[in-house]
Image (cartoon, coloured by chain):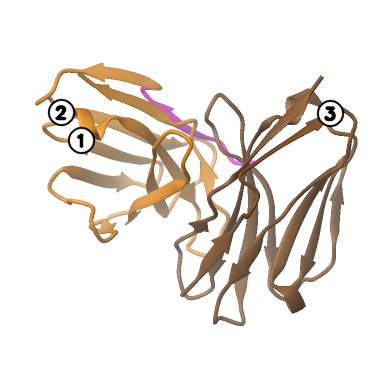
Amino acid sequence: AQKVTQAQTEISVVEKEDVTLDCVYETRDTTYYLFWYKQPPSGELVFLIRRNSFDEQNEISGRYSWNFQKSTSSFNFTITASQVVDSAVYFCALRENRDDKIIFGKGTRLHILP
Amino acid sequence: GAVVSQHPSRVICKSGTSVKIECRSLDFQATTMFWYRQFPKQSLMLMATSNEGSKATYEQGVEKDKFLINHASLTLSTLTVTSAHPEDSSFYICSASSGPTDTQYFGPGTRLTVL
């Protein structure tokens, strides 16, 4: 069975600090896709990144970076020089190749304090 | 990224009435649409998956007669909550993808309050 674990329920950091959100997944498939979504207070889910299981290259997009490590089944997300606008709930998600369903983690609520 | 809209964004209704929520993909053809439900401070729970022109596939525990889903075109899916009760109050979110292996793009959600 597939499963996504976000052990950090809530994190608070002071603005400009770096913060890493952890995500650990379980799957029996060799082909799968990992996602991160941001849900600000408005409620809309914003797509951040999609990664397939064959692409272990780390990715950087501005202040955001992702570290995908198959050896530890982790797909962690780091925000560098955090800003108040980064305050949101962040969801990590997994989709197996044989299925069109996405399984979401429980989310990490991130508070960036001014 | 792709744009998905939902209407209405917020609805308040009386117990026993039916409510229809629309989900539209604005700039791409969505062969597959998904409906989720999210309770406060919880994760998204998939309710059903619909493919254009086919009957929706419901997740275990979701009453198909209560949550009617129609996906009549490649840009529109509707969720009708029939005979709504206060326990149906929740945040309903749809997503759309142009294929089963493609990224899902989410709508802004609909907050339903049943009095």
> Disc 1 and disc 3: Cα gap in Å?
42 Å
Start and end of the magenta stretch? Answer: B1-8
Along the line of sight, which residue is nearer the eye, B42 or A40?
Answer: B42
Q: What residue type is labelled 3?
A: Val
Q: In this rendering, would A71 be left or right of B17?
A: right
State if disc 2 and disc 1 touch (CB < 8 Å). Answer: yes
Q: Circle 3 marks a residue in which chain?
A: A
Q: In this rendering, would B49 be left or right of A16?
A: left
State if disc 3 and disc 1 touch (CB < 8 Å). Answer: no
Tell me if residue A93 comes above or below residue A41 in the rendering: below
In reply to whether residue A30 is colored magenta, the answer given is no
List the residue tagged with mark 2: B18
> Disc 1 and disc 2: Cα gap in Å?
5 Å
Where does residue B102 sit, x and y in percent of width and height?
56, 59
Chain A image colour: brown
Q: Which chain is orange?
A: B
- Which label is found at residue B81? 1
Tell me if residue B26 comes above or below residue A36 in the rendering: above
Please give the name of the residue rendered at 50% of the width and 71% of the height, measured from the top-left corner: A2
List the residue tagged with mark 3: A14
Q: Which amino acid does label 1 sit on?
A: Val
Q: Circle 1 marks a residue in which chain?
A: B
Location of the C terminus of chain B by quadrant is: top left
